[in-house]
Image: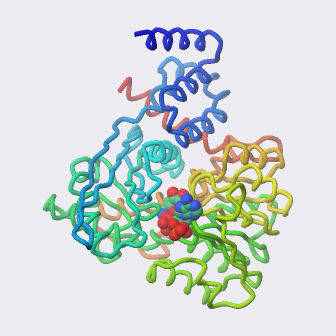
Amino acid sequence: MLTTNSTLLTEEKHKKEQEPIDFLLTKITDRDHKQLEFIQAVEEVFTDIKDFYYKNTEYQKAKILDRIVEPERVIIFRVPWVDDQGEVQVNRGFRVQFNSAIGPVKGGLRFHPSVNLGIIKFLGFEQIFKNALTGLQIGGGKGGADFDPKGKSDGEVMRFCQSFMTELFRHIGPNTDVPAGDIGVGSREIGFLFGQYKRIMNEFNGALTGKGINWGGSLIRPEATGYGSVYFAIEMLKIRDETIEGKTCIVSGSGNVAQYTVEKIIEFGGKVVTLSDSNGFIYDPNGIDHEKLEFVKWIKNTARGRISEYKEKYHDVEYTDTYLTPDYNPLWDIKADLAFPSATQNEINGKDAENMCKRGIYLISEGANMPCSMEAIKIFKENKILHAPGKAANAGGVAVSGLEMSQNSIRLNWTHEEVDHRLQQIMKNIHAKCLQYGLEGSYCNYFKGANISSFKKVADAMLEQGVV
Ligand code: NDP
């Protein structure tokens, strides 16, 4: 009783002292204080849309922000499965259906030991705005489990996926919620998940995207996030009358997004000198060419090995173990022109950001979701770095997932050229939307542009649909 009273008193005090948006952020921070990544994602959006929100009083009256930070539905469930030794294992599964104002919920599934509700909520919250930017009819959500596919046999991964879907199936569907892949969920996992979904439902439909090309998948879906991130960088460079040709690029990660980012950069004549995983990174001053990239794909997708194996095969390559420098990542201290962070959230902190500015980086296209800390974002802004947020730069993945849904609905498959052309057009449109709301003199604040443009679209839909 005492606690409740004092909480209410503190709330009243905050309400009087703070502007409505700051008060809301304080309320979220108090209530969801353990969900650090979610709070960070909310703060980033609030910072950029504040002035726009206050100017549009109808949003305030309808309490759009109070509603948008609250998921429509959160599902948490037990995922029991049996490992190869016959032992019972239990993981925790999540699906956060955040916002369906502009279409069925859509967003990937992440299987990684670090997954918790705060991470899934941050990803789901970001997804609302990202999906709005694509111009397609898709709402935002995310899901996953604290399951680590690394080191598991195919049989174990299959049994886990089947158990996960045995609960998830009742919450998803082509017009309700359409999951896809993310960290730890690639074509193998989507295959097992879809197989179980189809078996339980006795129906073949488009409730998942990232499907195999022979069973409802779209061409260019595996490539889409990485390709899209490079297409976005090309648009950013156009403003300076520049191209990727001859530019030195640093890329982090070595999974799906990183691989296809490298592929596209090579195609446009850029030189990629780094790749990483959660243990360390390789620096190849000669550049990663097509043959070396094929080897990386084999290591990561087939052998399911580590990026350190790259050094064992190629000469003049340095491998650095990043466990040795927990406060900063020396990958971001390499001299280059362009950066494509494509591993995970908060992989660039303030110190890394300072190093990047010193080392000549002038453009960052975020393949990963929220790879930069708030401090890093601030440093890039102060240094007038061209910096595209993940919700804009990596939206190509969900955009082609949206195109997969369209193809499933009309039961037709578009050609490679057609999907790629649509993807390029979508990335150009997103870039134009960022410019529309993000120009500050001759500098484009891509974060502000992306946040205001997408917020407006979702907020208007929410207004028109009443208090639901
Ligand atoms: P993958 O699982 O294919 O690859 C992830 C890569 O990031 C691996 O190299 C992995 O290394 C590394 N990584 C993961 N966690 C950490 C960590 N805590 N510290 C350092 N490195 C880490 O995932 P994706 O390529 O699909 O996803 C990468 C990023 O892109 C994520 O932020 C994801 O949310 C985002 N994204 C993905 C989309 C998609 O279509 N797949 C769409 C939009 C965004 P290791 O092998 O050691 O785990």
Q: Position of residue 144 (x, y in %)?
A: 38, 54
Is residue 343 something one can see in this rendering?
no
Seen in the picture, residue 412 relative to 369 is either above or below; the reply is: below
The answer to whether 346 appears left or right of 422 in the picture is right
| Image quarter of residue 274 | bottom right
Q: Position of residue 196 (x, y in %)?
A: 21, 64
Is residue 149 something one can see in this rendering?
yes
Seen in the picture, residue 159 relative to 316 is either above or below; the reply is: above
| Image quarter of residue 278 | bottom right
> Residue visible at 75% across and 43% down?
378
> Residue visible at 52% across and 28% down?
28
Seen in the picture, residue 121 relative to 5 is either above or below; the reply is: below
Seen in the picture, residue 214 relative to 390 is either above or below; the reply is: below
Q: Position of residue 307 (x, y in %)?
A: 58, 77
Hey, which residue is sitting farthest left in the picture? 202
In front of the other: 421 or 449? 449
> Residue visible at 45% across and 45% down?
124
Q: Position of residue 133 (x, y in %)?
A: 54, 48
In front of the other: 190 or 175? 190
What is the quadrant of the N terminus in the image? top left
The answer to whether 175 appears left or right of 335 in the picture is left
| Image quarter of residue 102 | top left
Look at the image and name its color scheme.
Answer: rainbow
In front of the other: 200 or 80? 80
Count the marks: 0
> Residue visible at 35% across and 27% down?
468
